Amino acid sequence: MPNEKKLEKVAELKEKISQAKSVVFAEYHGLNANQVNDLRAKVREAGGEMSVAKNTLVKIALQENNASSKEIEEGLEGPVATFFGFEDPIAPIKALAEFAKKIELPKMKVGLVDGVVATAEKLAILSQLPSKEELLARVVGGMKSPLSGFVNVIGGTRKNLVYVLSAVAGKKSEQSEA
């Protein structure tokens, strides 16, 4: 019979999984307490959260959310931390990968990104993508470029018209003086 504490933890995990845009499972064994605290802070800055719970409880929460799969079940072996991305699905993955570059821990195993199972290789690729804001800025810049070119062409035509009219006016004034 499960105790009240475990039931509460499953309910908490279930709620986080249902609200999260991304859920990543990573092996964190080998990190000391200070490194874990630094990692938690970096993930929090990226709009995510790090949680450590028994794998059995995580599996139950996943099953209750209909988010369980064979790949995820296999990824939940050994000491695994769960990383939730609530605002931007990629930002916590990027923060996790950036942290792992320094000390090669934690190692991403498997995850769910927008409801799709992602292997460690896919997560590594996702971590190298530009941020959502940067992509939006590129799109806006790409859309703005032709418009500003068009405005410059129209402005250039208008300037040329002014130069021609002033030249014609100058010639007419020279002819009337002569």
Image (spheres, helix red, strand yellow):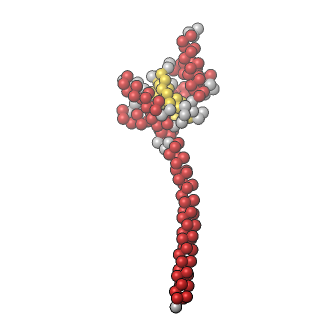
Of 59 and 134, nearer the camera is: 134
Residue at 54% across, 62% down: 149
Asked if residue 70 can be seen in this view, the reply is: no
Residue 34: quarter of image: top left
Residue at 36% across, 32% down: 103
Vertical position of residue 120 compared to residue 8: above or below: below
Q: Position of residue 33 (x, y in %)?
A: 37, 22
Q: 82 left or right of 100?
A: right
Of 73 and 36, nearer the camera is: 36
Q: Residue furthest bottom?
A: 178
Vertical position of residue 165 compared to residue 37: above or below: below
Asked if residue 67 can be seen in this view, the reply is: yes
Q: Position of residue 86 (x, y in %)?
A: 55, 31
Residue 38: quarter of image: top left
Q: Position of residue 99 (x, y in %)?
A: 40, 34
Q: How many marks?
A: 0
Vertical position of residue 165 compared to residue 115: above or below: below
Residue at 58% across, 18% down: 11
Q: 139 left or right of 108?
A: right
Q: Quarter holding the N terminus?
A: top right
Residue at 57% across, 18% down: 10
Vertical position of residue 124 compared to residue 163: above or below: above
Q: Position of residue 51 (x, y in %)?
A: 49, 23
